[in-house]
Image (cartoon, rainbow, N blue to C red):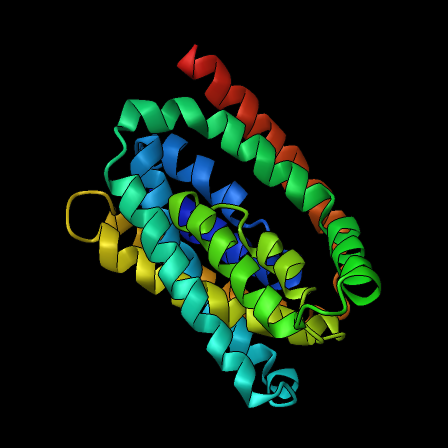
Amino acid sequence: MLTDALLFVIGAAVGVMNAVAGGGGLIGFPILMSVGGLSALSANATSYLVVMPGQFAAAIGYREYLRKIPKHYAWLLIPCALGAGVGSFALRHTSNQSFSDLVPELIIVAIGLFAFQPFLQKHFHKYLTKRVKHVRPFAAAALVLFLMSIYGGFFGPGFGFILLAALSFTRLNHMHQMNGLKNIATVVMSLASLAILSQGSFVDWRAGSIMAIGSLLGGYGGARFSQKAPSNISRIVVITIGGIATAYLAVRNY
């Protein structure tokens, strides 16, 4: 009972952080391993179930901003689903030991991208508008989203802020619009990944469902109060916990 309560609370925290700043998966992933007792591969697969309800609820919280996004942006969800499917297919054919050996490096990459996401987003937008004007932003975004979604389908934690960097290739300038679209894209990617990974014993449906309920509540609340939330503090918390998780997994594997 205590374990279930802890999973629920952490799930709510994952939902809040994904809605406000991203990176909630970097908290939920090590918790699934340490508290839930899952292997690295199973915790990664289960994380898609955990984040999906929270991202859906967060998207509802951003509905005022989503209504202002041009309807053709819905086409960007297709490369997200295809890329996630490719990545999860590769994950299915990766042994647990091989994946465990990769996890510390994957988390370091995710933390680095998360830490420098504002810089990357600004740089990508500047580069696109000043140096590659002959490239259509929408087409560039579709290609980048497909490639990045392959990574996200293979390793889910921390992928939300990578999506935000990719969305800087579009003409969306409002942060809450990009956040809302990011949430919808993550839902689509999670569904595609779960469709691939549900065919086997990769997903722990019990632990994942408990955290998913918490994520659902946290995602909506986080989205509604995101304008007042101290995103910089959330970013520091995610980076710190991610660093601790990296050290823990590296020592354990060693």
Residue 108 visible: yes
What's the residue at 37%, 33% (across, down)? 33
Badge count:
0
Q: Is residue 86 above or below residue 182?
A: above
Q: Is residue 92 left or right of residue 168?
A: left
Q: Residue 198, how many percent across, how many down? A: 20, 53
Given residues 216 and 200, the one toward you in this image is 200
Q: Is residue 140 left or right of residue 33?
A: right
Q: Is residue 60 above or below residue 237?
A: below
Residue 156 visible: no
What's the residue at 32%, 62% (across, down)? 192
The residue sitting at the top extreme is: 254
Q: Residue 22, how many percent across, how many down? A: 61, 55
Considering the image in quadrants, where does the C terminus appear? Answer: top left
Considering the image in quadrants, where does the N terminus appear? Answer: top left
Which quarter of the picture shows residue 42? top left
Q: Is residue 21 left or right of residue 143?
A: right
Given residues 133 and 109, the one toward you in this image is 133
Q: Residue 76, how many percent across, how many down? A: 50, 73
Q: Is residue 119 left or right of residue 206?
A: right
Q: Residue 142, how many percent across, how many down? A: 53, 67
What's the residue at 15%, 46% (across, down)? 200
Which quarter of the picture shows residue 97? top left
The residue sitting at the left extreme is: 200
What's the residue at 48%, 48% (across, down)? 10
